[in-house]
Amino acid sequence: MSYYSSHPTALLRMSPALIKSSCEGPSTLSNARVSHLSSRHVQYVHSKALSSDAVPSGKSAHYEGGRGRNMIDEITERRAKAGKLVAGIAAVSDSDMFKGPQTGKPKAKRWDNHLSQESRERKPCTLKQAAKFLKKPGLISLGGGLPSSQLFPIAELAMKVPKSPNFSEQATIESGQHISIGKYDVRDHDSEYDLSIALNYGQSTGSAQMMRFITEHTELVCRPPYADWRVCQTIGSTGALEQAIRMFCDKDRQDSILTEEFSFSTALETFAPLGINMFGVKIDEQGLIPEAMDELLSNWDVAARGGAGKPHVLYTVPSGQNPTGATQGTERRKAIYQVAQKHDIYIIEDEPYYFLQMQPYTGADQPSAPVPTSVDEFVSSLIPSLVSIDIDGRVMRMDSFSKVLIPGSRMGWVVASEQIIERYQRHAEVASQGPSGLSQVVLWKLLDDTWGHEGYFQWLINLREEYTHKRDKMLAACEEHLPQSLVSWTPPVAGMFMWLTVDHTQHPSGDATDLIKIEEDIFNSCIENGVLVARGSWFLTEKDKALQGLYFRVTFASASGEQMSEAIGRFGEAVKKSFGVN
Amino acid sequence: MSYYSSHPTALLRMSPALIKSSCEGPSTLSNARVSHLSSRHVQYVHSKALSSDAVPSGKSAHYEGGRGRNMIDEITERRAKAGKLVAGIAAVSDSDMFKGPQTGKPKAKRWDNHLSQESRERKPCTLKQAAKFLKKPGLISLGGGLPSSQLFPIAELAMKVPKSPNFSEQATIESGQHISIGKYDVRDHDSEYDLSIALNYGQSTGSAQMMRFITEHTELVCRPPYADWRVCQTIGSTGALEQAIRMFCDKDRQDSILTEEFSFSTALETFAPLGINMFGVKIDEQGLIPEAMDELLSNWDVAARGGAGKPHVLYTVPSGQNPTGATQGTERRKAIYQVAQKHDIYIIEDEPYYFLQMQPYTGADQPSAPVPTSVDEFVSSLIPSLVSIDIDGRVMRMDSFSKVLIPGSRMGWVVASEQIIERYQRHAEVASQGPSGLSQVVLWKLLDDTWGHEGYFQWLINLREEYTHKRDKMLAACEEHLPQSLVSWTPPVAGMFMWLTVDHTQHPSGDATDLIKIEEDIFNSCIENGVLVARGSWFLTEKDKALQGLYFRVTFASASGEQMSEAIGRFGEAVKKSFGVN
């Protein structure tokens, strides 16, 4: 695996990208405030002139950058050298403006044969292309229909947020910090982002300001091992998945998609109406089994599959899989990737729970294991994402702020090769037009301008602690209340979910052919007893196949410890009743 | 046209909808704050018990409600009688909870034959359906993966906004009002919406709180003449259009769509990759010509059209059409609607510029005409939307806050019949999941909780004044700088755009067959002279047809009066140069 590396010539080599004509905004500038708004072209403004003397080139130490603090320092230094980011209304940006050097990495492969007809036929917006003329000095634009910032009704937006590392709700109420965003902070207060920009139209990629943060965050955590990776902001992972499926799957080709045999029901409901065939791969306690995937693909028979083409896309949730809570270990991920290479599979990895990786379970009567105390230790503790071992550029990684920060922001991002991100962006500009500017400026103010990368990692460490406690309480409740001769589970190492397996072979009816009926009875008993759990059959990938076991999904995300204990007790009673035991 | 009518039994008849089990939320409640969060079921809580005695039924005056103030009073009264809206995290809502009575109105027709296969095959989300069990008292949910509100990092959000009617930027800076939204305002301050709700997951329809405001706004302005109309929030009109097209158009049926012969290029770029055929209808100074539409449809020959099916959808921008700036008058809209009825056409009306209807143009040296002084006068002055004459329920109206408030909110809404909104919602819940909660709570605080309907109308009146001034300056610049023997235009009565027609027959080349070359030369001259305008050919609906005239689109939305004068002068020089005149 080739990791990110950096050397002092970084800035020189970044310069062309930074100052290139990046002005294909959707329409015109507001001419009312030319000095401010003519910054549609992303650029850096430096207090001191950058000369090549200031940045020695060549023969520099070429070192493997570590994840964590070292790289945060590098990023801080890179930003300081680059100067103030100037990116005005609807400024065009891409990750290349913000990445460190990708020396020695190969370029991603091309995926033309994987793209749907719809995606291949997308063309850039005419009006956005016209905006390239805006770079001409003195030009007055009567070209596009952007409202004037003067007519936006919010002069200032302020918020009270946690002061790192005191993240608790109570600490924030008592001693949180007040931060605010003005309409013309860029002009008046030397800020890099303000309401005059965020409240206007933006780009489908999202703002340059958040693009920088997310690109750097991706470097810090994922460091894809190919050169031309990029990110694009999305309407959460749900929005990203819908666009991704339309990009890669084509009904007219009889396309098929692989996923875990039990998979996120909303994802399945996204695929189904598009006429995409779905097939489930066997799973174990680490999720998807690569050997099963290989076997399924090696023996694919189109006729026997009712005309369904051999799958060319894998949709997987590697960490804290929904619904099973399973997490693929490092070796498991590598093995899955190899099978994907063997069969020319493009991988969509959905990682909303990546930062809900938890400490190991210590047992019911033991205190929870302490969380990492440093950013280095924290980042090193994370299982590599599939995109981190992706030498071909065959992975689209979907991430989101929903599970770790603010679901209502409807903000996520995808990481993939330049080719794929460009196609994604073409779709987004005639659909969502990118995430809400209000969401973006609020998250930027918090994450970039207030906490910084280090503070955000501290927040994530705090979250790891919270979820470790929650999971431990759930496990304790299960150990206390469930009949372990009937119900089994694997302590989850990531996510929000636990998968309870009920041994149907012990059911007095002896009728394993009608598991769906037993599942329904237990579910109804649960409701009667006052607990809602999710039925395994809801997540079956292949709906036409009979249920092979009794499973129930429970979450430890929201209920209190006492509630979980009570609720698991009620579930246990329902199981015992169905099985006729005490 | 059957207008909205109301009588005092309204509340009684609303009650079943208000208290019905409306709890199909996406997943679980956070049990951490049961008293607060168990409000997933939308309901009203009243300080005084509502008895049937308090609201006399039957034999009441059955009157035609007027648009404007009278109806605002009705809505105020309706809200007061209904009591506090209680709608917690991801509460399900629909317009029927907030509409006045629709007495005497017919139900909308069904549009099954217009829906695409994709849309017909959509099923409700399994997990959302499971949430219906949440209404059981005392139930503890381990069912869905909603993060706990305690883990959201914003304790309070505050903003400085205009105090109606002093809307200017300067007045806001000097004497704007400060308003704020806390995390637990519903629990602690008797508010109806707060951050604990807005920052969590929501419904694809958007929040109940904004649903109420938008439903009432639709009553105040549009009052569809059929009973079962509803609204659904959208990711702006761009997001709405993409979903609408996938709902109504099906490549496998060889579907075709009609629109103006020059149409919004981004809309055309939305349709094209989906394999939908597009055809342009002749236009005049009031936009789409109904007779031309009738003729086109009456003589449709599938074979002669290369297999393209007879169009069954019309996409039109009735007010301030993009790019031509044309506005359909009331009679024109009725005539278009009749043609749609005759040919079984479903209409998608895109009305982002509806509230940019302006005062009549008074002439270059005259002061602009004064804007309406009252809400009544303002609302009465608006040309009826197509949905306001839609007795069949054959119109989907798309509206948005982008042009009139905050483009970066990515918030809009659609109005259509219950059947269509339900299908739209099924798509949104596996795509965007509805607009950003941050956008929603900010707009709710401003529009509903601070300004109210009356204040928002005052804002829109102020905007009408601003745009009237802007347009008048553009017209004055044209009159001053353009050679009127060569360039002609119609003063726009709505929108942001003006369409300049250059008389190509006078061109010295005499080569009317190569208009695209002349258009390009003029455009390039414009860039050289320092002005960006949009070329007519960019908006051609049928790209394979030769350009029949020379047109340029200019906007008066963003440039100042001085800049417009300078810019139009530069454009005039470019035209004169091409035509060899001084």
Image (cartoon, coloured by chain):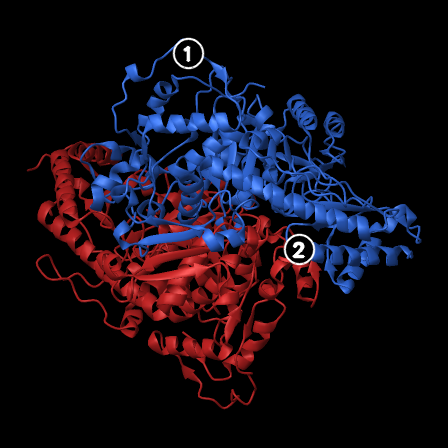
Chain colours: A red, B blue
Total marks placed: 2
How far apart marks 2 and 1 lie (CA) works out to 54 Å
Q: Quadrant of residue A542?
A: top left
Density class for disc 2 (Cα within 10 Å; few <14, some 14-19, many ≥20) is many
Identify which amino acid the numbered label 1 is placed on. Answer: Ser
Q: Which residue is mark 1?
A: B60
Instruction: Using the image as rendered, state which of residue B515 and residue A347 is in the foreground.
Output: B515
Q: Given the image, what chain letter belongs to the residue carrying mark 2?
A: B
In front: A165, or B510?
A165
Residue lying at 47% horizontally and 24% vertically, measured from the top left = B228
Task: Indicate the position of residue A464 as horizontal and vertical percent values.
Answer: 25, 61
| Residue of label 2 | B559
Residue B28: give x, y in percent of width and height: 27, 42
In this rendering, the answer to whether A17 lies above or below A398 is below
Mark sitting earlier along the chain (2/1): 1
What secondary structure is marked by label 1?
loop
The residue positioned farthest toward the top in the image shown: B59
Quadrant position of residue B242? top right
* Badge 1: chain ID: B
Within 10 Å of the Cα at label 1, are there few (<14), some (14-19), or many (20+) other Cα atoms? Answer: few
Q: Is residue B174 left or right of residue B13?
A: right
* Residue at 61% across, 32% down: B382
Query: Where is residue B86 drawn, in percent x and y?
Result: 31, 35
Residue B361 image offset from top left, x and y in percent: 72, 39
Given the current orientation, which residue lies at the most extreme left position?
Answer: A582
**Left or right of A44: which side holds A258?**
left
Q: Do tags 2 and 1 sit on the same chain?
A: yes
Question: Quick check: can you spot residue B163?
Answer: yes
Residue A398 visible in the current orientation: no
User: Relative to A36, does residue B418 appear above or below in the rendering?
Assistant: above
- Label 2 amino acid? Ala
Is residue B4 rendered to the left or right of residue A354? right
